[in-house]
Image: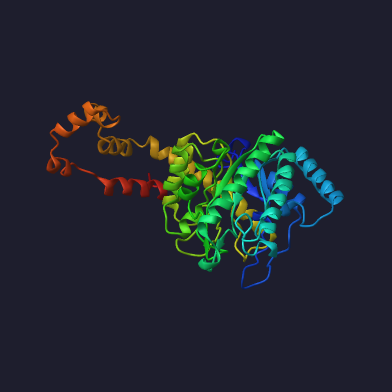
Amino acid sequence: MADAYAPKPQHKFTFGLWTTANPGRDPFGEATRPALDPIANIRKMAEIGAWGFNFHDNDLIPFGESASERDKIVKNAKKAMKDTGIVCSMATTNLFSHPVFKDGAFTSNDAAVRAFALQKTMHAIDLGVELGAKIYVFWGGREGAEVDLAKDPIECMKRMREAMNFLTQYVKDQKYDLTFALEAKPNEPRGDIFLATTGNMLAFIETLEHREMVGVNPEYAHETMAGLNFTHHVAQAIEAGKLFHIDLNGQKMGRFDQDLRFGSEDLKGTLMLVRLIERSGYAGPRHFDAHAYRTEDAEGVWDFARGCMRTYLVLKEKARRIDEDKEIAAILKEINRGDAKLEKLSRSYSSENAKKLKDAKLDADALAGRKLPYERLDQLLNEVILGVR
C-alpha cells in the first residue's frame, strides 16, 4: 500500500547541505558524528525523496580551494544531480565562519572587508547559477554589534543597501535568472543583528534600486526566538508579494537558535503555518533549515530529514480537514460578517464616502454583544490535531 505521506517532487522539499551534514557540534562540545561528504549528501537527499538541495559556497567548495579542485567538485555535483534528478534550488554565501567576518561582512567598518565580502559573494553567485539555483539567500549572521558605540547603525543600513544594489546590478549585467531573498534574525551569533525581523527586511527592500528582484526568506526559528508569531510574518510577506523562499524548522520560544526538526514544537502554530502556505498559492521550495539532535548517529540524521517531510505532509492533510469541516466552516462564516453597504464606504476613500460613514448609525453596544465562539473554534482545531475529528 502506498504511503500517503511519502515526499514527491511536486512537494518541493529541500534541505541545505549544512543541515544533514551537521556533525552535532555545539559551543560546549565537539562533534558527535562524522562529517558528511557533500556529494554523498546530495545523493542521499535524493534517495529519501527531497526535490532539491541548497548550499553555502563553502558547504560545497572548501574555503581557499584551488580552481582545478573547485571545477572537479562542481563536475561531481552535476553528475550526482543528473544521476538522481535532484535540483539545486537555492544558494547562498558563507559570510560568517571565517575570522575575516568577525565584525561583519557588508556592514563591516573596514572597507577592505566589505570589498572582500562582495568579491566572495560574486564568485558564490556564479557557482550557484552554474548549478542551476534560481534563488539566492542573504543571511547577515555577522551583520550586527555587541558594542553599539562601535557601529553607526545608520551608516550600516547604507552599507547594506549599497551591497544589495551592487549585487542585484551584477546579476542583471550577467543576465542571470536569479532573485534574492533576505533572511532576518534578531540575534546570535551577534548580540544584536541588523534588520532583525521579516518586517524590517520588507521595509528595507523598498529602499533598493532593483526591489523587484528582492524578497524575503523568513525562518521559523528566527521569528520564534524573539517571541513573535511566525505565521503572521509569513502572511505579511505573502500579502506584499515578497515570499521568495522559506526556512522551516522547530523552535522553543525565547531560546537560542535550536533549528529543531520541523513540527517538533508548537504543533498548532506549525499547522497554521502549513495551512497558510498551502492556501496562499506559494509555489517556491519548502526548505528545512534544521538539523538532527546531537544525540543522533549518522543514520539518525536521515530519520530526522524524513521526519521533516512527513510531518509537513501530515499537517497539510490536517489543514485540508480543517477546511472541509462543516462545523468549523459554519463558525468562520458566523464570525466573518460582511456588510456590502459599509464595505463600499470604507474600502476606498472619497469625500462622499467619508461623509456617509461619519453619518452612519452604528451601535457600539449591539456590535459588542455579537457572539464570537472562539473557544469552540479552538477546541475543534485541537480535535483535528489530536486525530479525533
Residue appearing at x 51%, y 53% in the figure:
195
* Above or below 144: residue 139: above
In this image, 40 relative to 199: left or right? right
Q: Is residue 188 visible?
A: yes
Q: Quadrant of residue 28?
A: bottom right
In this image, 39 relative to 197: left or right? right
Q: Is residue 176 visible?
A: no
Residue appearing at x 74%, y 47% in the figure:
123
* Above or below 164: residue 192: below
Of all residues, the one furthest to the right in this rendering is 68
Of all residues, the one furthest to the bottom in this rendering is 28
Task: Say how the picture is coloured.
Answer: rainbow
Q: Position of residue 212 (x, y in %)?
A: 55, 35
Q: Quadrant of residue 94?
A: bottom right
In the rendered image, the quadrant that contains the N terminus is: top right
Q: Position of residue 153 (x, y in %)?
A: 51, 58
In the rendered image, the quadrant that contains the C terminus is: top left
In this image, 158 relative to 98: left or right? left
* Above or below 269: residue 332: above
Residue appearing at x 82%, y 43% in the figure:
75
* Above or below 30: residue 259: above
Q: Position of residue 96 (x, y in %)?
A: 65, 59
Residue appearing at x 47%, y 54% in the figure:
223
How many discs mark residues in the rendered view? 0
Q: Position of residue 58 (x, y in %)?
A: 73, 54
